[in-house]
Amino acid sequence: MGLLQQVPAFDVSYGETELLVVSTNTTIVRLQSQAFAYVKTRRLLLRGLNITVVDHLVFSGLEEIIISIDLGDNSISQLPYDTFFRLTRLTTIKLDGNKIAVLDQSTFRRMSQLRFISLGNNLLHQLAPVLFRDLINLQILQLQGNDILTIAEDLLANLRNLEELDMSDNRLSTISADAFASLTNLKHLNLSGNMFTGILTSSFLQQLGKLTKLNVSRNDISALKSDAFQGCRQLTVVDLSNNRLTLIQHGTFRAVTSLKLLDLSTNSIESIPDDLFDANNSLVELDLSDNALVDIGRFLLNVSHLRRLDLSKNFLSEIPLSAFRNLVNLVYLDVSDNRLESQLDGRLLLQLEEIMIDGNKLTAVELDKPSVSLVRLTVSSNSLINLPRLFHAPEMALLDVTNNEISAITDLSFTCCRNLRQLALASNEYFRRVISGLVFPNRGRPVS
């Protein structure tokens, strides 16, 4: 359609439709009053049209039928208080990706059927305490990517059916103890990318008894109080990555006995208490990459169901087999970019499917027993003199030994890897000699 100053008139004879979509090839400057008065549609998609102006009562006439309105990815800066006036059947409103700085306190008045609101990526900095007062059936609220500084005490008071709250990438630095008190059915909470500092306590989490996923990554949290998760006994996923944690206290995760995924990557953790996971036998994935660990200790002995472990980018000088003796379900291990030296104990590889050991100082990797599950082995940028000695790895599909000092490769080097599909050998002594011989074939011989 190209550039339009406003919504074109609709024929009164149009029948009822499930969805009305305005093409993204169209630019509509203004949504004029009663623009859709003769439209009979349940869902209205007006996303990405570069709309800048919304008049009063723009959706008047849709009161008896409309259930979903999508105004996302436009250039709306002001929304009239009566934009959704009497649209009490609405279950979904999307206003994400606009330039809205302020919402009138009556914007969502009497909209008790709303289940989903997306207000992410706007310029909101303060929300009226009564803005969501009537949204008693709201299940998903997205407020990410704004400039919100505080959560008014009563802002979320009536959202007892809320299950997902995303307030990531705002400017929150504190949350009052009662801010989430009414969110007794909340399951997912995302507070990543805010301005939280210091010690994370249980104050605003203690009443979230049904919470299963918590994301507080990309903040400046330096410590976790031992009872931080005391009230969140159903947590299965916790993301604390990209903070400033230096120490984890004893018993921090003791209350969350259903924990399955824990991300502590990109912090400054120097050590892990041996008993940290003594009540977390259900843990399946643990990411401790990019920290300051110098020793593994005994903290892995109680997580026998662990399947994925990332210890890359630390200061580990050895991987003791004793620390792994109870990890009978481990299939993925990343210990790249540490300070491992000498030879890696091949018994670590027997049950693994993927292991990354790149960026260390290993001189040898040898297996004297079959590793029937191993699919991927990367040992680039080490000090290997010989190819990894693989006794029997029938499922091996990828082997990377680039940037080592390997000097010999024979026709029998890979007979144990019948399914090998990707082989990386570049930047080794063997190839430097081959290339040298090709470029200077008479080197060392007298020239006649």
Image (spheres, helix red, strand yellow):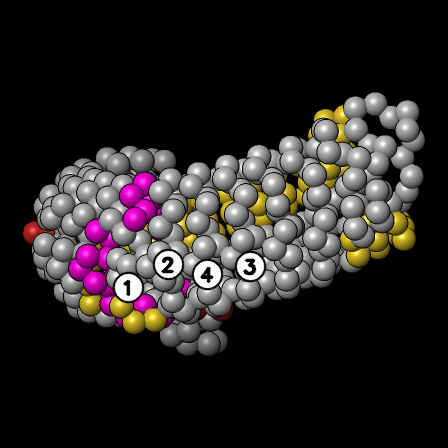
Residue extent of the magenta highlight: 207-230
Q: In the rendered view, does 312 fall on the left or right side of 280? A: right
- The residue mark sitting in front, 3 or 2, is 3
Mark 4 surroundings: few (<14), some (14-19) or many (≥20) residues within 10 A: some
- The residue mark sitting in front, 2 or 4, is 4
In the rendered image, is residue 151 in sight? Answer: yes
Mark 2 surroundings: few (<14), some (14-19) or many (≥20) residues within 10 A: many
**Residue 158: percent from left, percent from top:** 46, 45
Q: Which residue is mark 4?
A: 151
Q: Main secondary structure of the magenta part?
A: loop
Q: Secondary structure at mark 2?
A: loop
Mark 1 surroundings: few (<14), some (14-19) or many (≥20) residues within 10 A: many
Q: Secondary structure at mark 1?
A: strand
Q: Alpha-carbon distance for marks 3 and 1?
A: 27 Å
Q: In terms of depth relative to the viewer, which is nearer, 433 or 12?
A: 12
Q: Identify whether 262 is placed above or below 331.
A: below
Q: Which residue is mark 3?
A: 128
Q: Alpha-carbon distance for marks 2 and 4?
A: 16 Å
Mark positioned earlier in the residue sequence (3 or 4): 3
* Residue drawn at point x = 38 percent, y = 52 percent: 180
Residue 216: numbered disc: 2
